Amino acid sequence: MYIVTGCAGFIGFHFSKFLIKRKTKIIGIDNLNSYYSKNYKLDRIKILNKSKYFKFYKMDLNNKNKLSSIFENNKITKVIHFAAQPGVIYSYKNPESYKKNNVNATKNLVQIIGKNKIKKFIFCSSSSVYGDHKKYPIKENFKLKPINYYAKTKVECENIIRRKLSNSKCSTSIIRPFTVYGPFGRPDMLLLKIMTNLTYQKKINVYNFGEHFRDFTYIDDVVDIVFKISKLLNNKINLFNVCASNPLKISNVINLIKRNQKKKMQLNYLKKRKGEMHITYGSNLKLIKFIKKYKFTKFDVGYKKTSTWFKKYKNKRYLRFSN
Ligand SMILES: NC(=O)c1ccc[n+]([C@@H]2O[C@H](COP(=O)([O-])OP(=O)(O)OC[C@H]3O[C@@H](n4cnc5c(N)ncnc54)[C@H](O)[C@@H]3O)[C@@H](O)[C@H]2O)c1
């Protein structure tokens, strides 16, 4: 049986859905925090709850006793840890949330994993741990130069995991995903923000005048890859970038969206914000070597799928997000 933390969140939801389809039993954990709409998270949980293979615990990973009892009372073999406080800009507004939900929550979980016989642990870190570099694409062994507090807490989590699980029998993988997008995506991220603001005819802020590059990686690819990594059992701590390795300039992404919809886009070009990386562009060679051949979803295909979902999603009001 798997534990998936952050199952009401974007990636955790999709990963849980993927496992359920394969008739794998899961315990999903999420505290349904209000960083973005709780109702949106509940919409995801409603979908997962339809399956008999899914059991949901609304709880905080900082609740040690409750978390320990879940491990004691169930035959858990694999733990996939997606729960976190994400977002770069918000990390300047509410750093305590990052300390609590990234560092402390991961520390708790790792301690409990150390005490139980867990075969596999995957920690979802982030591409943001790299910061800006002169050379691209970024490989896993590049120096970590986190430039915002969110990224710093992810580095701290990685270090905790290395310290606590290096000598354990639990096979551990740390993954660093790059700009994940797709249906049921995060309302604080670019694509959904654009789609939502278009719906409500609001201005769309384009930071750094659209000069940023992002290595957009489609959600189905991420989920598929995480599943493959969950099968990797060895005594090392494995580290993988999870990315399509195809950076796109934001102004080009905006042009593509413009071409694909009729509404007038009100674009508000602004300067770069503190803490935002200029380019995210990862090397996926190490990952490909492990999973063998892999065909990543092309951005225009992934975008179309996201847009089709968005048109059908009834509760668009849940997607409003401002920062
Ligand atoms: N989406 C991306 O592009 C991206 C890129 C790189 C890394 N990541 C990482 O992937 C993971 C999943 O990201 P996401 O985009 O799905 O974010 P998300 O915010 O949609 O999901 C995270 C979930 O974790 C839950 N959570 C937070 N703190 C918790 C706690 N203390 N106890 C229990 N639940 C808690 C939240 O309620 C939320 O539902 C995160 O670790 C994030 O840092 C995401």
Image: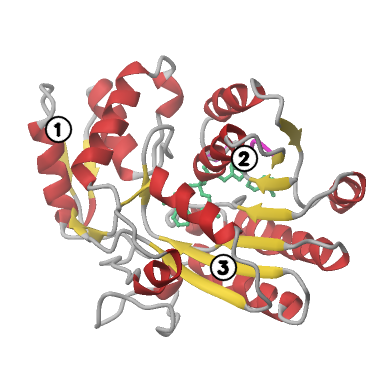
Residue found farthest to the front:
292
Q: Are marks 3 and 1 in contact (CB under 8 Å)?
A: no
Mark 3 packing: few (<14 Cα in 10 Å), some, or many (20+)? Answer: many
**In the figure, is residue 304 to the left or right of 314?**
left
Residue depth check, mark 3 versus mark 1: number of the one nearer the observer: 3
Element on which disc 1 rests: loop
User: Which of the marked residues, 3 or 1, is nearer the chain's N terminus?
Assistant: 3
Residue depth check, mark 2 versus mark 1: number of the one nearer the observer: 2
Q: Tell me what residue is drawn at x 39 percent, y 19 percent.
A: 313
Q: Tell me what residue is drawn at x 53 percent, y 71 percent.
A: 152
The x, y position of residue 298, in whole percent, is: 23, 48
- Compute the Cα span from label 3 to label 1: 40 Å
- Compute the Cα span from label 2 to label 1: 34 Å
Residue type pointed to by label 3: Ile
**In the figure, is residue 38 to the left or right of 104?**
left
The residue labelled by disc 3 is 174
Q: Does the segment drawn in magenta span residue 33? A: yes
The residue labelled by disc 1 is 266
**What span is colored magenta in the figure?**
31-35
Q: Are marks 2 and 1 in contact (CB under 8 Å)?
A: no
Q: Tell me what residue is drawn at x 30 percent, y 19 percent.
A: 311
The residue labelled by disc 2 is 7
Q: Quadrant of the N terminus?
A: top right
* Mark 2 lies within 8 Å of ligand 1 (Cβ measured): yes
